[in-house]
Amino acid sequence: MESPYFLPLLASLQIFFLRGSPADLPAPPNIFVSPEKMEYLIGDTVSFRCVAPPSKDKIQGFQFSGTTGWAVDIRTFRKTYTYTFNITGPKDGGSHTCRYTIIDRLLRPVRSKESKVIIISVKDPPPHPTLSLNTSSGVVSEGYPLLFICTAPGNTVEHRFHFYKEGAEVIPGSEVNSSETSAQLCIPQSSQNHTGNFTCAYEEKVEGRWILSFASSVVTVFVKEPPFAPELGVDPSSAVVTEGYPLRFTCIAFTDDSRLRFHFYRDGVEIPPGQAGSETTAMNPGNFTELLFPQTPRRFSGKFTCGFEEDVGGTWVLSPQSKVLEVTVKDTPAQPDLILNPPSGEVREGEPLLITCVAYGTSGEWKFYFYKDGTEQFSEACTRNHSFFSIPAAEPTVTGQFTCRYEERVSGKWIPSPLSQAMMVTMQASSLHIPLVTGCAAAAAALVLVLLLAAYICQRRRGHVHWKGLHNKDDTSAYPLALVS
Ligand SMILES: *[C@@H]1O[C@H](CO)[C@@H](O)[C@H](O)[C@H]1NC(C)=O
Ligand SMILES: *[C@@H]1O[C@H](CO)[C@@H](O)[C@H](O)[C@H]1NC(C)=O
Ligand SMILES: *[C@@H]1O[C@H](CO)[C@@H](O)[C@H](O)[C@H]1NC(C)=O
Ligand SMILES: *[C@@H]1O[C@H](CO)[C@@H](O)[C@H](O)[C@H]1NC(C)=O
Ligand SMILES: *[C@@H]1O[C@H](CO)[C@@H](O)[C@H](O)[C@H]1NC(C)=O
Ligand SMILES: *[C@@H]1O[C@H](CO)[C@@H](O)[C@H](O)[C@H]1NC(C)=O
Ligand SMILES: *[C@@H]1O[C@H](CO)[C@@H](O)[C@H](O)[C@H]1NC(C)=O
């Protein structure tokens, strides 16, 4: 339909259009908004209806735009178009206009003047809540509870709270306990996969609709591996010690952390600092502590363990206890028995004298020492609990006061016993003729003596604790002759 005939005119028209003022553009459309509100809420659905004025021009489409920078083009031949969208945030607020497009005589699209402006004012989401943990820092040890508290600001409107980890809503099953303005999320037993960034938000009911608030700031949680049980060591390593001798424990924590507090336990009860003269020494590095009993108390045997506390983000977290070490505390060796044969201690010249020293204890290793008037006569190491000192033919020099003692091997240490009671050996003149009656009387006297001796040993055995420490062989003379007293 267009012919070359029109070409010059069209060319001049083009020049005319390019120079044209806005007044020459197609008349502006009408714009209507629905619903009309002073303030729109997030979630509101808004419709703009753009109506082109009556004209013979062919409509090609509409454009809707907002001052926040968006524009949407719609192709249609209708004279009216309604554009609907949901308000999702403040970016949907501001001024909005529409235009329509026609095809001019040169078949070029021409946009109309802008419609009047419609201003949408979007109500801000509710202000962000505050998220906090009830511990001083976000570091906890695995297994310990985590308590989050999400508090909405101010007013007492109805709220619905949500907790998020890395932006994903926290799994139901974790308990959420909410009041009107705050909610708690309790994770009764944290595990390492709770490590992460937590936030919370709440919904507030506005005009019958739940509006989600801005998110709280991030709370970072770090769930540490639980502490390993420490290792308890003991010296002597056999865990057998004699009362009065040193007993040393060491507790080693397998951690680089030096802020540790160590505890030692005997039969499950914590050993208080300084008990029985004990000394606790914190070592360097701090993952190592020593407990020393310079003199192990009597009857202190027991099951020993240790544990420690670790400062995890301001909370002292108790480690599991070490394996049990069973320690045996032995009494000091008991006083030995010294037995003479002949029992009276009266020996004839040339006749044999047998002296037996009997040890106590169960160690299976003993050393025996025999003394006459404080001077060592004989010694031997034995695996039996008695030793013999034998004089096959007594000479007059045999006369004197005999004692013995032993040492018992406990955990590699030779532990000395006290001295036995002293026994007097006397020489009976061989030339002397003793009448039978005298002999009988002597035998009777000897019997009484033996009975006395037995009584005496029993007494001493019960009371041998008083002899403790008096095991120096130089002390022999300190014990006066018991039998003949
Ligand atoms: C707007 O929100 C309604 C529900 O609130 C939904 O059904 C609709 O699909 C949304 N429209 C758009 C364009 O997102
Ligand atoms: C934090 O809350 C948990 C759970 O209620 C509780 O067990 C824990 O002792 C609290 N911690 C502190 C430091 O208050
Ligand atoms: C919520 O916490 C309150 C006290 O803080 C308590 O009395 C109530 O039992 C808790 N509710 C639930 C469902 O745990
Ligand atoms: C977290 O760890 C626990 C065990 O410690 C496991 O049962 C749970 O499935 C884990 N959760 C995730 C999300 O990995
Ligand atoms: C938590 O956020 C910090 C930065 O805020 C980031 O470096 C870290 O990787 C996040 N942690 C996790 C587990 O996503
Ligand atoms: C004790 O701590 C130090 C550093 O403080 C570390 O090198 C060592 O490995 C730790 N010992 C144990 C047994 O974990
Ligand atoms: C000495 O050992 C024997 C067995 O070897 C035992 O029967 C006896 O009771 C022990 N004597 C003392 C005093 O311990």
Image: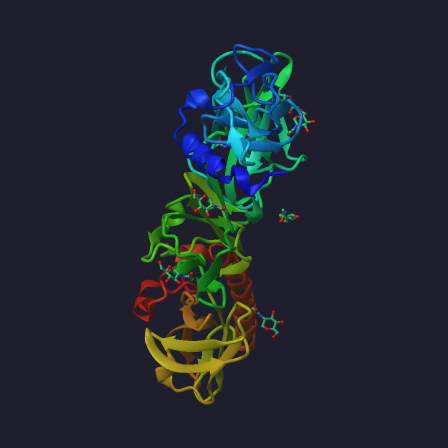
Residue 482 visible in image: yes
Q: Position of residue 160 (x, y in %)?
A: 61, 22
Q: Nearer the viewer, residue 256 or 127?
A: 127
Residue 166 visible in image: no
Q: Nearer the viewer, residue 409 or 203?
A: 203
Q: Position of residue 49 (x, y in %)?
A: 61, 19
Q: Quadrant of residue 472?
A: bottom left
Q: Nearer the viewer, residue 108 or 125?
A: 108
Q: Is residue 250 above or below residue 226?
A: below
Q: Is residue 309 left or right of residue 1?
A: left
Task: Give the residue displayed 61% in from the left and 11% down from the top.
Answer: 207
Q: Quadrant location of the N terminus?
A: top right
Task: Give the residue displayed 51% in from the left and 59% down from the top.
Answer: 327
Q: Position of residue 282 (x, y in %)?
A: 34, 53
- Given the current orientation, which residue lies at the most extreme left position? 474
Count the marks: 0
Q: Is residue 358 above or below residue 32?
A: below
- Identify the coloring: rainbow
Task: Give the residue displayed 43% in from the left and 53% down from the top.
Answer: 297
